[in-house]
Amino acid sequence: MASPRVVSLLFVVALVSYSATAAVAQICQQIPDAICGRQIVDNIFHNIGNLTETCCDALLRLGEECHNTLVERRIAAGGYEKDVVNVIERSFGAWKGCSSLDSCRKLTDATCGSQIVQNVFHNKGNVTEDCCGVLLKKGKRCHTVLVGERIIAGGFEKNATKVIRASAALWDKCSIPGA
Ligand SMILES: *[C@@H]1O[C@H](CO)[C@@H](O)[C@H](O)[C@H]1NC(C)=O
Ligand SMILES: *[C@@H]1O[C@H](CO)[C@@H](O)[C@H](O)[C@H]1NC(C)=O
Ligand SMILES: *[C@@H]1O[C@H](CO)[C@@H](O)[C@H](O)[C@H]1NC(C)=O
């Protein structure tokens, strides 16, 4: 296992060679941290490992155009001649996988799921510390999207605003200790 310093240096080198142009800087604002950068590069270019939810979020924050451009630059720089088709496939796959709701649902724990639904949608009960942990691990994006999906599915037309308020309040309560 490389030390964090080496990993971060590798990532910076990788990034500098593919993204340090004005054109890329313009479309890429939120570059992932070294750990996620490495994970994304490993997954797409070396077919190693999967992206964690945190790194999926980092990937999505890049935006699709930036993501595609970074991959394109890295391919163009050379060294992946034998595997370009697979690299492109994995690049699209990573984007799709991270944006899909499946990756959010996969993280749902039945007990905590029901606690969260009762709290947010029915104004009943509190969410335990353990379930706050599960919620935070899912990430803000998954929380927002799953709540939105349930609202869209119907039955909350009259109190959707209340539900959204409760959803935001629960996130804050879980993410800000003591709040
Ligand atoms: C990555 O995810 C795929 C599909 O979800 C799974 O089949 C595979 O075992 C995972 N690989 C690792 C290294 O976790
Ligand atoms: C919203 O309305 C639904 C359906 O009438 C009800 O079951 C639910 O408890 C309400 N939720 C809140 C937070 O008021
Ligand atoms: C939920 O928490 C509030 C304050 O944090 C407390 O007053 C209330 O009794 C709790 N409700 C349940 C059902 O535990």
Image: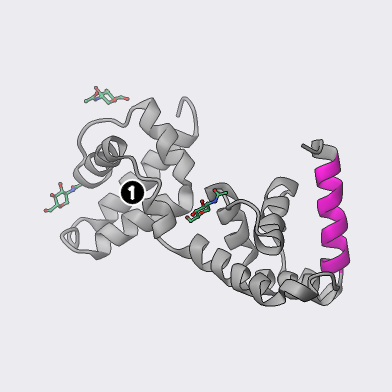
Circle 1 packing at 10 Å, graded few (<14), some (14-19), many (20+), is few
Residue holding disc 1: 165
**Residue 138 appears at what percent x and percent y?**
45, 45
How many labels sit on residues? Answer: 1
Apparent side of residue 162 relative to residue 107 in the rendered image (left or right) = left
User: Residue 3 lies in what quarter of the image?
Assistant: top right
Residues shaded magenta: 6-20
Q: In the figure, 34 relative to 65: above or below?
A: above
Name the residue nearer the viewer: 168 or 63. 63
Residue 159, given in percent of the width and then of the height, sits at 20, 55
The residue under the point 72% across, 70% down is: 71
The answer to whether mark 1 is within 8 Å of ligand 2 is no
Residue 58 found in image quarter: bottom right
Name the residue located 19 percent from the left edge and 43 percent from the top edge: 122
Say whether residue 48 is left or right of residue 140.
right
At x 23%, y 47%, the residue is 121
Where is the C terminus found, in terms of image quarters?
top left
Residue 39 located within the stretch drawn in magenta: no
Seen from the viewer's position, the closer of residues 101 and 157 is 101
Q: Main secondary structure of the magenta part?
A: helix
